[in-house]
Image: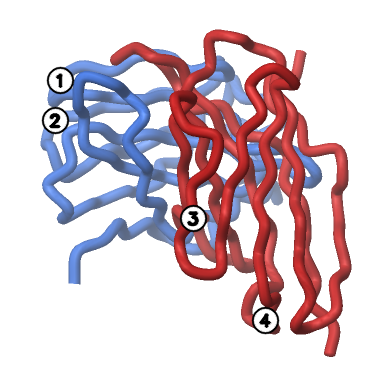
Amino acid sequence: DQQVKQNSPSLSVQEGRISILNCDYTNSMFDYFLWYKKYPAEGPTFLISISSIKDKNEDGRFTVFLNKSAKHLSLHIVPSQPGDSAVYFCAASGYSSASKIIFGSGTRLSIRP
Amino acid sequence: DGGITQSPKYLFRKEGQNVTLSCEQNLNHDAMYWYRQDPGQGLRLIYYSQIVNDFQKGDIAEGYSVSREKKESFPLTVTSAQKNPTAFYLCASSTVGTRSNQPQHFGDGTRLSIL
């Protein structure tokens, strides 16, 4: 049973436009959410996170939105750049020192010129 | 520069053979993790350790073993009991606070294939 779902395996966006990556979760105990970016043959790198007490967190071109009632979060990248082409993983964890981070299956973002 | 080093980058295993994947970090992180990634799937947790000489099973620990004798090192052994070991293996580390949701730092992975 996938607790963190990224239903779009791939997304293509024109350079300069907004990229929106979506993520849904099923476990209401999750209260911390993260996005990671991964290039081929490399490990994921942490991008941005959000706590459940907030509904928005912004860092430069990256903004994460959290809708707790819908159990949905999204990552907005604006403007999209060629270097943003990568696989993006959504992840979630609960409020506990024993909580594990659960990853989604990833969305491959391609930025076209 | 601080970081996580995984070696080797590519590894081949014969049927019935155990292999060990290396993971070393110099970030002074207490927690270390091993994940497995298969095509089209997310990262699945194999084992994790929050302190030296202690580790816990993740979601898919069967056929794997680990040790944590030093803070810097968390090697993963893929045993012959793991029937489908071909995958991309990622090691990660993080600090440990009152919540376990500290962002993890990842190595560049080891791709294991069966001969």
Tag shown at residue A58:
3
Tag shown at residue B53:
1
Q: Amino acid at mark 1?
A: Asn
Are discs 2 and 4 both within one chain?
no
* Badge nearest the viewer, 4 or 3: 3
Secondary-structure class at tag 3: strand
Residue at the image position 45 percent from the left and 16 percent from the top: A94
Which class describes the residues within 10 Å of circle 4: few (<14), some (14-19), or many (20+)? many
Query: Is the residue under label 1 in contact with that under label 2 (CB below 8 Å)?
Result: yes
Secondary-structure class at tag 4: loop
Residue at the image position 55 percent from the left and 69 percent from the top: A61
Q: Colour of chain B?
A: blue
Q: Disc 4 marks which residue? A: A81
Which class describes the residues within 10 Å of circle 1: few (<14), some (14-19), or many (20+)? few
- Name the foreground residue: A48 vs A53: A53
Are discs 3 and 1 both within one chain?
no
What is the chain identity of the residue bearing mark 1? B
Tag shown at residue B69:
2
| In the depicted structure, whether residue A92 falls above or below residue B2 | above
Q: Amino acid at mark 3?
A: Glu
Secondary-structure class at tag 1: loop
Distance of label 4 from label 3 (alpha carbons): 17 Å
Which class describes the residues within 10 Å of circle 2: few (<14), some (14-19), or many (20+)? few
Q: Is A68 displayed left or right of B66 in the figure?
A: right
Tell me which corner region of the image, top left, top right, bottom left or bottom right, holds residue B50.
Answer: top left
Q: Is residue B46 visible?
A: no
* Badge nearest the viewer, 3 or 2: 3
Q: Earlier in the sequence, mark 4 or mark 3?
A: 3
Q: Is B18 displayed left or right of A4 in the figure?
A: left
Residue at the image position 61 percent from the left and 25 percent from the top: B82
Q: Colour of chain A?
A: red
